Image (spheres, grey):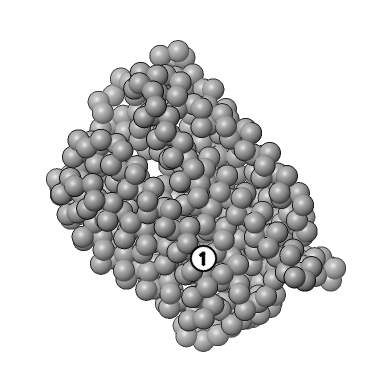
Amino acid sequence: MSGSAQQTRRVILASLIGTSLEWYDFFLYTTAATLVFPQLFFPSLDPLNATLASLTTNAVAFVARPLGGIVFGHFGDRAGRKTVLVVTLLVMGASTFLIGVLPGYASVGVLAPVLLALLRFVQGLGLGGEWGGAVIMSLEHGDGRRRGFNASWPQVGVPAGYVLATGLLTVMSFTMSDAAFQSWGWRVPFLLSGLLVFVGLWVRLKVTESPMFAEVEERGAKARMPLVEVLRTHPRALLSAFTARIGVDVAFYTFTAFIIVYLTTVLELPRSYALNAVLIGSALQLVLIPLAGALSDRFGRRTVYLAGAISAAVWVFAFFPLLDSKSFPLIALAAVMALVTHAIMYGPQAAFIAELFSTRLRYSGASMGYQVAGIVGGSLAPVIALKLFDAYGSTLAVSIYVVGALAITALGLAIAPDTGDLDAAAAPPAKAPLPGQVGPFA
């Protein structure tokens, strides 16, 4: 194996481990926000409103993520990808550890949910800078014909982090009494983050800087104010990245977060039904996401991405009737197939968005387009779904909401040319290409 191939594999492994740990931290909070935090931090509210309040603090991270993308994206385009990825891992790990030692409402009153929201905000900052760097490092190393496959591996960190986080919380919740789990058991996975972060740091410190960024640095072509230049020269690319992601996020958080609330609160089923169903689907995604990334190298980013969006739009109308059966095998089928459709979209998404921007602006541009969409998509999806169900008393309204978001994703794909065969190092053209044309920044 050549040194270049070895370094590419090392970079992909470092990106995968790092993003898995960061998403482990992120999903610990998301899962705890539905299972533990309503009672611990909002005990004075009724169950539905306590859950809504808890999910609102969860949404704080999505507001912080664009800010993290802006700050870390700037330094990623100025100082390099590797340094920023080390910092984002430290930020995420420290905030998650501190959540694990945070006192509840019974101990410090209203200060508890305030501190919870603050630490969730810091988590969002770290994750906002993490995604762009991990994807870009994987994309900018190795064979240009395998960019979709290489860039998809940091995306695998999402189901890997979910499996790890939810799996640990599930083990803790089922190996101790409810009282012990609510009191201290839920804290253990958060505290473990402080140890796991050192594993990620050890791996990341061993990788080399992106060769494409090194070339930009050698030519003295780094942007002085990357985000300003992105806004000025890449408005269409930003719009495409933003809209292409919205439906993916809404579908994902409906399939993984709202399902927990719906099964436990509305259908009054054991929480194990939701957790185990999503765990099975997430485990399958570990294989399907890189497969979808590889397919995008062969058939094009938009083709594979759109196939996933259409599949998700169709499946959401079968999703809730299967949940309503209250049969675990059918609930598992609903979750697994839903996450299969998500994997088809998520595999090519990383390369699709990153390739929209030239090397000297890629960290800032990709991070901004991706993270801003998270506010409109993922942060609000569980809350909107819960409100729609509460208002209409039917899951049909939730399904229509998901389909509407996926239609926006289809629009984002339509306004951008496919990018699979383009030079990832190319500079942006003076004018954005029309739909269907191929331009060097698409």
- Which residue is located at x 34 percent, y 22 percent? 178
Q: Is residue 230 visible?
A: no
Please identify the quarter of the rendering in which residue 169 is found. Answer: top left
Farthest bottom residue? 437
Q: Secondary structure at mark 1?
A: helix
Residue 302 relative to residue 256: left or right: right
* Amino acid on which the number 1 mark rests in the picture: Pro
Q: Is residue 272 visible?
A: yes
Residue 83 relative to residue 325: left or right: right
- Which residue is located at x 70 percent, y 59 percent? 10
Judge whether 114 appears above or below 282 on screen: above
Q: Residue 81 placed where, x, y %? A: 71, 57
Q: Which residue is mark 1?
A: 290
Judge whether 140 appears above or below 30 on screen: below
In the rendered view of the protein, which quadrant contains the N terminus? bottom right
- Which residue is located at x 20 percent, y 35 percent? 268
In the rendered view of the protein, which quadrant contains the C terminus? bottom right
Q: Residue 186 placed where, x, y %? A: 45, 27
Please identify the quarter of the rendering in which residue 138 is found. Answer: bottom right
- Which residue is located at x 25 percent, y 25 percent? 46
Q: Nearer the viewer, residue 94 or 433?
A: 94
